Image (cartoon, helix red, strand yellow):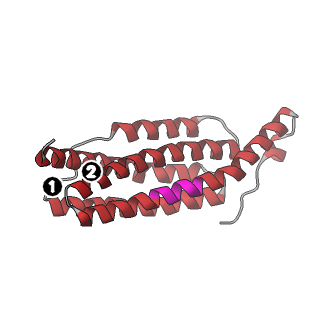
Amino acid sequence: MSNESLKKLYVDELKDLFSAENQLVKALPKMAKAASSDELRAGFEKHLEQTKGHVQRLEEIFQSLDESPKGKKCVGMEGLVKEGAEVMAEDFDDAVLDAGLIGAARRVEHYEMAAYGAVCEFAHVLGQTRHASLLEKTLAEEEQTDDKLAELAKEINAQANEEGVEEDQGAPRSARKTPKRAA
């Protein structure tokens, strides 16, 4: 692959990420609103602010390339966002819904980590060290978010299991509600 071909692929992949991040800017507030755990809601809100920063970094890269970030829709992220919306549309109780939201969010994070890993390598090969630095910073934030979601899942999944046991034992719905924790 010639340098120009690789640069074309690099720009195309960056456009895909730009679309993906902008889709997340719209999806994360909905996920935060749906979360019953205060800690999970705060995590989604924090990641929304990070995601806005990811968009800004990508815009900086596009500006330095004298390219437009627009013109491509990330169908992979579109599908992941749709799956997350399906979880929110289900009639799950608090912790079960939160467990589903975490699963959806972790799929998004892994998709982003793969994409940022690829463009980081392209940036290095193309000699775009400033781009690589910006992209690596975003990749590190995506990995940290995934780690936080994995940690939060341990507690929330246990709560979701308890809700299911109580439901199976015929506990009244009011007794099954998980109290909201302070952030």
The residue drawn where x is 22% and y is 49% is: 10
Whether residue 56 is visible, yes or no, is: no
Secondary structure under tag 1 reads loop
The residue drawn where x is 72% and y is 52% is: 155
Compared to residue 57, the image places residue 16 above or below, namely above
Near-viewer residue (56 or 107):
107
Boundaries of the magenta span:
142-149
Whether residue 19 is visible, yes or no, is: yes
Image quarter of residue 151? bottom right
Identify residue type, mark 1: Glu
In primary-sequence order, the first of circles 2 and 1 is: 2
What is the quadrant of the C terminus in the image?
bottom right
106 drawn magenta: no
Q: Is residue 177 left or right of residue 50?
A: right
Residue 92, percent from left and from top? 67, 38
Marking on residue 14:
2
* Neighbours of disc 1 within 10 Å: few (<14), some (14-19), many (20+): few
Residue 106, percent from left and from top? 53, 47
The residue drawn where x is 12% and y is 44% is: 2
The residue drawn where x is 39% and y is 60% is: 138
Identify residue type, mark 2: Leu
Q: Is residue 94 left or right of residue 6?
A: right
Secondary structure under tag 2 reads helix
Residue 79, percent from left and from top? 42, 35
Image quarter of residue 73? top left
Residue 115, percent from left and from top? 36, 47
Marking on residue 67:
1
**Residues tagged 2 and 1 counted as in contact (Cβ below 8 A):** yes
**Residues at marks 2 and 1, CA–CA distance in whole angstroms:** 10 Å
